[in-house]
Image (cartoon, grey):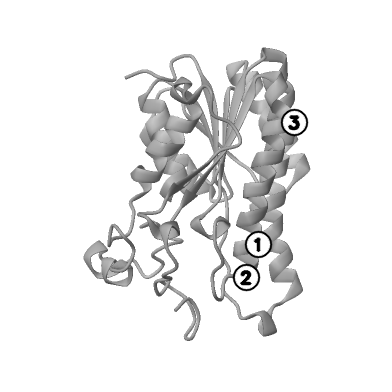
């Protein structure tokens, strides 16, 4: 398939996990892909592994100046920006009584401000073209509450709301904006101890599909949202969570401090 032939895509947080999988699948379907991350060695390795027109550049998504430089670099190299996948994010566990303001500000700067700035810097190019797609990666925790993930959950609800507002603001210019809401995913963030999938699945037995997701499973839904197959979809939220958001059960989250995420 070549659903993205001739398209230019940016993927943030692309050095590993869902971001890397998304960049790889976009390139496999014909897109020219700009990978962005703060992990330079991994990012360059990911771009080299993808090959073709893929390239990597360091980007701190919370920096307006970094975004201005990076967006200009992509346009100089490829002449357009058709797709933005705002994937970069960090997770943060804490009980509210132990909340440190600086840590909360960092989570919000990356997860929320980073998403806003990405939209800010691609919107002008997309408006001139009269088309474009922004896919914001939120979380199952942007659909429900989560014990011990207060700051992260707040950030992912913010991404969900931002998506809907941008859909209204940018829709008249031909730009679609959707959010994808992964559940547990077998990435470094979701599996910091690098446990085997069979072992991880024990924590998800009461989620309807009874297992953790894989990065490619999220990436395939992101590609759908970014493709012309979703041409009449904007402001939508796509849960890719094994059914987690269909009910109230909250599994024990990998890496959560004792007493949290249960």
The CA span between labels 2 and 3 is 28 Å
Check disc 1 and report the residue beneath it: 154
Foreground mark, 2 or 3? 3
Figure check: 87 above or below 156: above
The residue depicted at 65 percent of the width and 41 percent of the height is 163
Give the image quarter of residue 3: top left
Looking at the rendered structure, the secondary structure element under dot 1 is: helix
Figure check: 238 above or below 29: below
The CA span between labels 1 and 2 is 6 Å
Where residue 6 appears, as percent x and y from the top left, is 48, 14
Between 140 and 111, the residue placed more toward the observer is: 140
On the rendered structure, is 226 left or right of 151? left
Pointer 1 local density, CA inside 10 Å: few below 14, some 14–19, many at least 20 = some
Where, quadrant-wise, is the N terminus in this rendering?
top left
Asked if the residues shown at circle 1 and circle 2 are in contact, with their CB atoms under 8 angstroms apart, the answer is: yes
Looking at the rendered structure, the secondary structure element under dot 3 is: helix
Check disc 3 and report the residue beneath it: 169
The residue depicted at 43 percent of the width and 42 percent of the height is 20
Disc with the residue nearer the chain's start (2 vs 3): 2
Check disc 2 and report the residue beneath it: 150
On the rendered structure, is 42 left or right of 198? right
């Amino acid at each position: 398939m070549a659903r993205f032939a001739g398209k230019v895509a940016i993927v943030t947080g692309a050095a590993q996990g869902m971001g890397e999988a998304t960049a790889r699948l976009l390139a496999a379907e014909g897109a020219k892909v700009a990978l962005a991350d703060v992990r330079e060695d991994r990012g360059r390795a990911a771009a080299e592994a993808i090959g073709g027109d893929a390239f990597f550049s360091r980007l701190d998504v919370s920096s307006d100046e970094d975004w201005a430089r990076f967006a200009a670099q992509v346009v100089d190299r490829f002449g357009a920006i058709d797709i933005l996948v705002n994937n970069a994010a960090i997770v943060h566990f804490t009980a509210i009584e132990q909340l440190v303001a600086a840590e909360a500000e960092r989570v919000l700067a990356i997860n929320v401000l980073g998403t806003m700035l990405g939209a800010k810097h691609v919107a002008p190019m997309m408006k001139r073209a009269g088309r474009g797609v922004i896919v914001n990666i939120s979380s199952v925790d942007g659909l429900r509450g989560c014990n011990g993930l207060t700051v992260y959950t707040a950030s992912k609800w913010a991404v969900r709301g931002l998506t809907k507002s941008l859909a209204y603001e940018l829709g008249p210019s031909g730009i679609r904006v959707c959010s994808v809401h992964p559940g547990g995913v077998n990435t470094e963030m979701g599996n910091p101890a690098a446990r085997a999938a069979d072992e991880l699945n024990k924590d998800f037995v009461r989620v309807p599909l009874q297992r953790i997701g894989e990065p490619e499973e999220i990436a395939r839904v992101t590609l759908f949202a970014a493709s012309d197959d979703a041409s009449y979809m904007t402001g939508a939220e796509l849960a890719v969570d094994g059914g987690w958001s269909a009910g109230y059960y909250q599994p024990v989250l990998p890496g959560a401090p004792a007493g949290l995420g249960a």
